[in-house]
Image: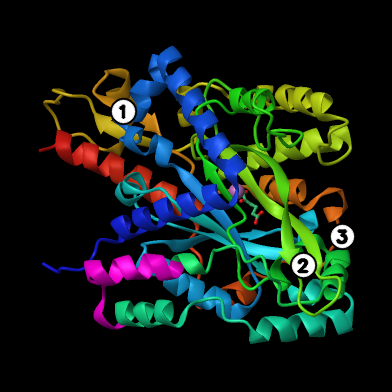
Amino acid sequence: MSNWANADSIRMKFSLLMSDMYQTEVPLYGKLVDLVADVNRDTLAKDPEIKAILEKTGEMPRLNLERHGAIRIGKAEELFNIRRVFAVMGMYPVGYYDLAPAGVPVHSTVFRAIDSESLNNCPFRIFTSLLRLELIDNEALRNTAAEILAKRQIFTPRCLELVELFEKNGGLTEEQADEFVREALETFRWHQDSPVSKELYQQLHDQHRLIADIVAFKGPHINHLTPRTLDIDAVQVGMKDRGITPKAVVEGPPRRKCPILLRQTSFKALEEKVVFAGGGDTAGSHTARFGEIEQRGVAVTEKGRKLYDELLKATRAAVGGAPTEANRDQYMQTLTEKFSVYPDTYDELRQQGLAFFHYTVNEGKSVDHKVTANDLEALIAEGIIDFEPIVYEDFLPVSAAGIFQSNLGENGQKQYDENSNRQEFEKALGATVANEIALYEATQQKSIDFCLAQLNK
Ligand code: OOG
Ligand code: NI
């Protein structure tokens, strides 16, 4: 037995500190958290079926804890070290997202817990994007940006020392872990004073707002946190009622009886005061930080994902591109129409191999003969085995681009024809990213194996 602090508890402590910090820095976020808690309470009271599923899958205690955050970092070494920092909290890189085709000069991964028990203990995860400086077309500006980034250190020296201790000893003591979360939090803090002049900020900003958000600041301030709701349409309406301005449309699939993947909306970024370097006219502002809400549904298979991508593409083709304030109603209507062919019962989703499920033996049930995976359908029909949706724990590149755009403002859209560069990303990361579909597949298979072992006992 080791006396090392548990990674899930370190992550939990860190996420609670982060939430407190963000509510202080962005008070509107606190209002959003309250709204989501109200909507979740109403939904659970109205819909006993949702409540039963959440109770059975063990997700109930984590419902109001569910949060993801996002950061944007500037250089390879930062990505390498952030991976080491997140490993202390039991968070590992899953998935590769290339945002360049959607006009955002970054590529990303998500640091999150992998197994379902750890996810239930604390689902906190961070969408982490790395700037692709090579996509800045102005060479002089690109070099200046690289020089500024080369000089910065986004981790406290003590944070890196504790990471080294963790790597050397295989863990941290409780006391070291508490110190670690406080030190690690510093990396994500908002700094009002910018290391660059107002002029340079403007040049970076004119190139792309995102580039200014990364290069003109001391560190990768947390740019949003996201609670999980059970009814995102109610939150979208509720935001307006409480004086919070939501983005034009909810990203992702349309409203369904059996939610799939991920739906997201956000409130628009706030204008925050910035003090630029150098004398003279140094006061200014920057808009980047916002609040987001997510509703999660069942994880889909490769086949399910292909169908999702096709229907989303068809919707966008029909309305002439990404949704805007002007075409939002038409967009949502078209989306619903296109998705009417996507099966909307858990039974169909399962039988057609479109989504992943977690199988369990119903209480008190047994069999009088040996069973194999081939008997699964019969066992379900006989009420011996039951299944629940496996929640999608990852993100969607088109939705993520929509979230980026909504807080980068109207002029955020650019065209990049660079190829996606996963190898480059993994080289900077110092590790490969896990394949999310393979993880869901393994979770599903484990539950089937467990059922069969239990019945054959
Ligand atoms: C990240 C946007 C992506 C999501 O939920 O899809 C994201 C960012 O704005 O840095 O967080
Ligand atoms: Ni997000």
Residue 373 placement (x, y as % from top left): 30, 38
Q: Amino acid at mark 3?
A: Gln
Question: What residue is drawn where x is 55% and y is 25%?
Answer: 231
**How far apart in space, not on screen, are marks 1 and 2 (Cα)?**
44 Å
Q: Dot 2 corresponds to which residue? A: 212
Residue 148's place in the image compared with 211, above or below, is below
Residue 85's place in the image compared with 258, above or below, is below
Quadrant of image for the C terminus? top left
Residue 30 placement (x, y as % from top left): 54, 40
- Residue range (magenta): 168-184
| Residue 429 visible to the viewer | no
**How far apart in space, not on screen, are marks 1 and 3 (Cα)?**
46 Å
Q: Amino acid at mark 2?
A: Ala
Do the CB atoms of the residues marked 1 and 3 lie less than 8 Å apart?
Answer: no
Mark nearer the viewer, 2 or 3? 2
Residue 18 among those drawn in magenta: no
421 vs 125, nearest the viewer: 125
- Residue farthest to the front, as pictured: 280
